[in-house]
Amino acid sequence: MSDSSDFQCLIPSGVRMSRFEHLDAAAHSRILEWRNHPLVSRRMIRQDEISAEEHQAFVRSLTNDTSKAYYEISLEDPIGVIDYYSIDPVHHSAYYGYYLRPDRIGSSLGILLEYIVLEYGFRHLNLQQILAETHPSNTAALNLHRQFGASDLGINPRGLLESLFHLNDWMQVRLRWSGIVSRMVEPARLDDGQNCESTHN
C-alpha cells in the first residue's frame, strides 16, 4: 500500500487555497453568486437557489464540523471552489466536489481543480480513498474522473454515479498530471512544487 507521507506535494506555487471560515464577506458574496448561477447550480446535487442567510449559517457550521472542508481556489484571481465532505478519519476517505466560477466554465481550469482535489486530499488530508458523486448526464465530469484514474462504482440511491479514486491508482498517474498542470499554470516549474501546508490559509 502506498503511504501518502512518502511523496512531496506537487501543487503549483501560484495556487492559493483559502478555507471558507477565513474568507471575508466580499469573498462569500462572490462565492454565493457563483454557486447560484444557472451554469453552476444545474450541475450540483442541490439545484435550488441558496440564500445569503443559508450560506452564512453553513459557513458558521464549518468551524466545528471536521467532516467537511471547503476552499476557495485562486490563481492570481479566484477561479472556483473545491470541497471535501463525509470525511472519515477511520477509513481515510472522503467525498469531494468542485465548481469553477461561471465565466471559467469550459476552460482547462477544471483539470486544475480536479488535480488539486486529489493531490491535496491524498497528501495533506492523508486520505486513502476519494469519491465523487456525479449526475449521469454530466459526461464531461465523468470522463475527466476516468482520465484521472477513477473507477465507476455504479448509481447510488440518490441517482448519482459514484466514482472512486484510490491512493495507489493516483500514484500511478500523478506525475503525468503534474506535468500537464505545470504547463497550464507555470511553464517549466513544478518539479520542486510547494508544501501542501503552504498552499492554504
Image (cartoon, rainbow, N blue to C red):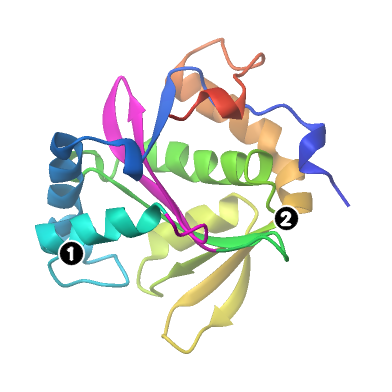
Question: Which residue, as the protein is rendered here, is positioned at the far bottom?
Answer: 157
The quarter holding residue 152 reads bottom right
Q: In the rendering, which numbered label is found on residue 54?
A: 1
**Given contact means CB atoms under 8 Å apart, are the residues at marks 1 and 2 in contact?**
no
Question: Which residue does the numbered mark 2 point to in the structure image?
Answer: 128
Farthest front residue in view: 64
Quarter placement of the C terminus: top left
What amino acid type should be assigned to the residue bearing mark 2?
Gln
Residue 177 horizontal/vertical position (percent):
60, 35
Q: Residue furthest right?
A: 1
**How many C-alpha atoms fall within 10 Å of the one at disc 2: few (<14), some, or many (≥20)?**
many
Asked whether 117 or 110 is in front, the reply is: 117
Q: Nearer the viewer, residue 23 or 35?
A: 23
Residue 144 vs 120, above or below: the answer is below
Vertical position of residue 92 compared to residue 170: above or below: below
Q: Predominant secondary structure in magenta?
A: strand
The crowding category of the residue bearing disc 1, from other C-alpha atoms within 10 Å (few below 14, some 14 to 19, many at least 20), is: few
Asked whether residue 3 appears in the rendered view, the answer is yes
Q: Can residue 108 be seen?
A: no
Which contiguous range is marked in magenta? 64-86
x, y percent for residue 20: 33, 44
Identify which residue is drawn at 68% across, 52% down: 127
Q: Position of residue 87 (x, y in %)?
A: 57, 61
Determine the residue positioned at 50% across, 26% down.
199
Amino acid identity at mark 1: Glu
Q: Nearer the viewer, mark 1 or mark 2?
A: 1
The x, y position of residue 115, in whole percent, is: 53, 40
- In the rendered image, residue 29 lying in the magenta stretch gets the answer no
Residue at point 38% right, 55% down?
Answer: 62
Quick one: label 1 or label 2, which is nearer the N terminus? Answer: 1
The answer to if 78 sits in the magenta stretch is yes
